[in-house]
Image: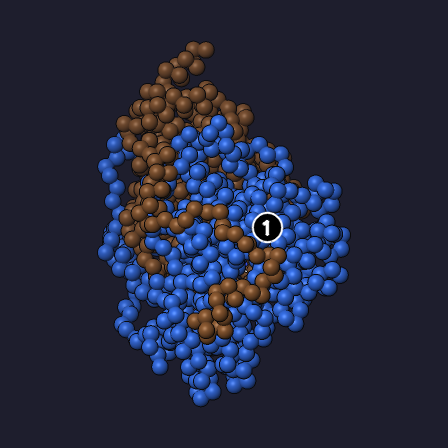
Chain colours: A brown, B blue
Amino acid sequence: MLDACGAASAEDLFAHLPDAVRLRRPLDLEPGISEYEIADYFRARAGENADGYASFLGAGVYRHYRPVLVDAVVSRGEFLTSYTPYQAEISQGTLTAIFEFQTLICQLTGMDVANASMYDGSTAVPEAAMMAARITGRHRVLAARSVHPEYREALRTYARHQGMPVEEFDYAKDSGAFDLDDLERKIDGETAAVIVQSPNFFGVIDDVGAAAEIAHARGALLIMVFTEAVSLGILAPPAGADIVAGELQSFAISPSYGGPYAGIIATRDQFVRQMPGRLVGQTVDTRGNRAFCLTLSTREQHIRREKATSNICTNQALIALMATVFMTVYGKEGLRELALQNVAKARYLAGKLQTVFTGKCFNEFVVRTGDPESINKALLKKKIVGGLPLGRFYPELADSMLICATEMTRRADMDALSDALRPRLAAEEMA
Amino acid sequence: MIRKVRTHPSQNEALLFECSSPGKRAWQLPELDVPAVDAAEALGAANVRGEIPGFPEVSEVEAIRHFTRLSSWNYSIDHGMYPLGSCTMKYNPRINEVVARMEGLAWAHPYQPESLAQGAMEVMARLESALAEITGMDAVTLQPAAGAQGELTGILLIRALLEKRGNPRRRILIPDSAHGTNPASAAIAGYTVENVKSTDAGVLDLEALARAADGDVAALMVTNPNTLGVFEANIAQAAEILHAKGAMLYMDGANMNALVGIARPGDFGVDVMHLNLHKTFSTPHGGGGPGAGPVAVKKALEPYLPTPRLKRVRGKWAWDFKRARSIGRVRAFYGNFGVTVRALAYILAHGGPGLRNATVDAVLNAVYIRKRLEPFFDLPYPSPNMHEVVFSDDRQAKLGVRTGDIAKRLIDYGFHPYTVSFPMIVHGALMIEPTETESKLELDLFIDAMISIAKEVETDPELVKHAPHSTRTSRVDEVAAARKPVLRWKPA
Ligand SMILES: Cc1ncc(COP(=O)(O)O)c(C=O)c1O
């Protein structure tokens, strides 16, 4: 091959590089190792994490059972090792699956169109906010404080240099639902979007319709965020939402220390041209057979460059496929049953603990424990990972933690948690 | 002449929604070990939804057959060469999939206590330091989810540093050969994009750069090797011009597969860059994602990196959230950790010398293709190429056949097409990147196919213009799809 290239040695291939840029020493990395040693290395690392603990963590990342079919499908090289389906004729597998995904998300959210996909729920939120600003020609966004705190941080990072002030409205201290009066006070004629989450970060089911009415009365759009997709199996789709920005991690995507997950944006037909991200559309081939292809790409960066609706290119396609398989496995009846099991588990556990908010919850809720950090330390000795201490995000809730139960949470573990918390709770009440 | 493929039966399959029948199920749940609840009572009657109209109802066998049949309509790296330029479609080792699924890694919750996440944090720290060594940069963040988000992060870092110095400036310079994400990312960071024309040789024009780089320019975003596969030999001088004006050099590292072990951006003046783990470091593309776009920076930019950062506290890893100068988060949690695991596995498998060998092979393969195809296709920029080569369809266009047609015909020969019509500075581009994955055998089959198609263009252009002929789906009407968008299934 070197001969055919007119090169005497491999080194010749790099002869045109200026000498000053060349690395003249070997990379300072260990020599390569075998497959067996690689498995060993990662097994050791995995062992240093929380193996074999019961966990009550949720807060945007949920422990749901992953049906084995999911990995059976996404491990197929045909899906795993293909690129973005630009060449439709040899990518109908991926394209068809994405079309099904878009349909499933529409059915689930009650929206007309859904993209496939955003990086995750947290980046779907700023993308939705920028979309709302383009649609309304306004710039201010108003986010509920009960939207996931890390999502709001991502929103601020994206908004900062776009002349997009991000303001927040509060939650009601009794119910944990958003405070409609505070929303009324803060919304104005410059507000492009009101952003709410349901179930919200505290697990409380919010009245999205009421927020939508207020938003629409002032000419703003309503963006509904969800982090717990399983809730959509039983909860009514968001009434009055103009854009839905969500996270699908609950649909068979392992927690994987924070990613990769998959975000989506869904909206009404009339806004589709302002939507970010990839879309697959139905068409025909030259023989008249149904076929699918990427479409409306004039919204995207490879055509529109700095005027594109988003900079996203590589997305989360394989993760969206996981969610598609998950929705297929559970289907109409199963997703409802799964959601109901989550409600039942959370109700059982909440009934044994001192919850902070009165609002109805799906599968997580806030519990006042007093000093959650030290309680969690004690729980670790019983092989229990407790809830998320809330002080980091909500100083006023520094005495509380967010606790989650899913279909995978065993009654025995819930009993152990409540037993461990009970003496503390009793002591708190007496004090 | 077509040696790699023959037609074979492929099964028809309806959409999921069309295969559903009431009452079929693929799911199982254990018996509840707590009292069941009444949905309306527990959630409030108004909050409870009815049945989800149209949601699928299929059996387990039907589900697996459905997706298996769909999969059979895809081409993939596992089928053969996938020479998409700029995409670095290399083999995805399966051990990486196995280790990413190990329970302690796959089930690690991002909020689990640091004391129980040391393994995950160690993996991230080790990858950060390997990438710093490979790029010659001082610090790395793994937070960005893909290349484009890495670009946004990098430009925000530059902005933050310039703001600190008193003036964030207003413009970002981008060569006309750049990928579309570059200008799109600069715009989200609040900058005006100014295109700079490349020279006739397809590289940075230093004079044009010197003219454009005034006190209002924040940075130049450059891809190196550029999207022609040509190394920007004047990169160090470009950095000097920019630095003299108080501006910075951003490098799009999408093409690092040409440089690993050979040259390091940190050694030629780059201030900040991103890498695509789903290109250079072999994490699978999965039909479009997920990827990861780590950003590597020089010391001056380190204080601005997204929160949180890994730090060492009394011999353990900890997350540092208190970083006053940080640009903040670009996303929730710490990045696409599962992708991180796969990339580290790739680096461990290769080791230093193995990574360098991969680079040499990737460049050798691309140069070999260039030499063999040069007699048949126009090469508008004849500078020496590295990991990819870009031809133009000029010669074939005269006979009415465009790059898109040649690409479709390649499918009939058993190959995935190359990248079509990018970079934009090449008229009718054929952008070919073989990667180190391909053997001489596969390369020769590909080259023979390209030569055969070049001859078909002369003898039977219609054959090429209506390709592919061997696929179950013939040429797809993309214009109709965009004219009247059908973006979801609806019951008839
Ligand atoms: C040169 C170049 N820059 C940037 C990108 C964007 O990277 P990503 O798709 O990971 O966002 C790509 C790839 O798609 C690319 O080829």
Q: Residue B469 at x, y = what percent?
A: 37, 78
Along the viewing direction, whichever of A161 and B302 lies nearer the viewer: B302
Q: Which quadrant of the figure contains the N terminus of chain B?
A: bottom left
Point 40% across, 37% down: residue? B119
Point 23% across, 37% down: residue? B31
Is A397 placed above or below B370 here? Answer: above
- Tell me which amino acid carries mark 1: Gly
Q: Residue A308 at x, y = what percent?
A: 59, 59
Is B465 placed above or below B263 here? Answer: below
User: Which picture quadrant has residue A217?
Assistant: top right
Q: Residue A274 at x, y = what percent?
A: 56, 57
In this view, the residue farthest toward the bottom is B459
Is B16 placed above or below A430 here? Answer: below
Is B19 placed above or below A133 here? Answer: below
Tag 1, which chain?
B
Along the viewing direction, whichever of B306 and B204 lies nearer the viewer: B204
Asked whether residue A385 is in view, the answer is yes
Point 34% across, 50% down: residue? A34
Asked whether residue A172 is in view, the answer is no
Q: Which quadrant of the figure contains the C terminus of chain B?
A: bottom left
Tag 1 secondary structure: helix
How packed mark 1 is, by other alpha carbons closer than 10 Å (few <14, some 14-19, many 20 or more), is many
Point 28% across, 56% down: residue? B63
In the shown orientation, is residue A217 left or right of residue B357? right
Along the viewing direction, whichever of B306 and B375 lies nearer the viewer: B375
Q: Number of marks in the image?
A: 1
Whether disc 1's CB lies below 8 Å from ligand 1 is answered no
Q: Residue B85 at x, y = what percent?
A: 49, 66
In the shown orientation, is residue B209 left or right of residue B256? right
Residue bearing mark 1:
B266
In this view, the residue farthest toward the top is A430
